[in-house]
Amino acid sequence: MFLLFCVYYCEKKEGKKVVDFGTKNLMDHATNCSSSDSKTRKQMAMTAFINRQKKTLVSKSEQAKLRENEAKFIGGCQLPFNVVDNEHFRTFCQNLIDKGAKYGSVGASDVLVGRKSVRSDILKMANLVKMLSKANCINQWLRELSQ
């Protein structure tokens, strides 16, 4: 985006003409451009642009309540402190936030399942992982036999 701006600037202000807007010509223009703006300004990386999210600021008092509840959760369940840095915990929390934004205020009891359901889901996941690892072992064994 910046390169296109630079080309536009140079064509309009300095009378320079860029014949083609292909990547090579844009890159050549960027390296040879005499515009002082092009030397100092940096283009945002595409990944940074894509990953940029609109941030909604939470008030200091709400942040304090969330922090207190997080500490009560970790301390009350006697979980290790590093659980809050776990990607799965953060994904779970983000999912809850997203659902709250989508559906509004909903009771936790209406959304979260109980310990028996969690146990059942974990056992299903464990069995699936077990079956996949067996399938991988069988596939590896078959590949070795065919060689």
Image (tube, rainbow, N blue to C red):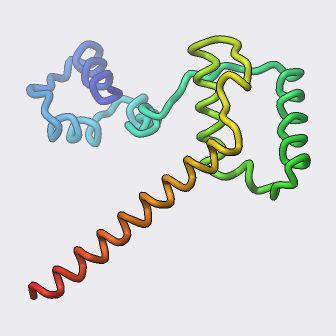
Location of residue 54 by image quarter:
top right
Q: Nearer the viewer, residue 118 or 83?
A: 118
Could you tell me how many numbered marks the image carries?
0
Residue at x 63%, y 45% (from the top left corner)? 118
Residue at x 46%, y 37% (from the top left corner)? 48
The quadrant the C terminus occupies is: bottom left
Q: Nearer the viewer, residue 108 or 113?
A: 113
Left or right: where 109 falls relative to 59: left
Above or below, comparing residue 130 to residue 80 in the picture: below
Q: Nearer the viewer, residue 56 or 83?
A: 83
Q: Position of residue 113 (x, y in %)?
A: 66, 34
The quadrant the N terminus occupies is: top left
Above or below, comparing residue 26 to residue 62 in the picture: below
Q: Position of residue 102 (x, y in %)?
A: 56, 15
Q: Position of residue 90 (x, y in %)?
A: 64, 42
Above or below, comparing residue 89 to residue 130 in the picture: above
Left or right: where 9 falls relative to 51: left
Residue at x 67%, y 31% (from the top left corner)? 112
Left or right: where 134 falls relative to 28: right
Left or right: where 132 falls relative to 127: left
Q: Position of residue 21 (x, y in %)?
A: 14, 28
Residue at x 61%, y 16% (from the top left corner)? 101
Q: Nearer the viewer, residue 64 or 17?
A: 64
Above or below, comparing residue 126 to residue 103 in the picture: below
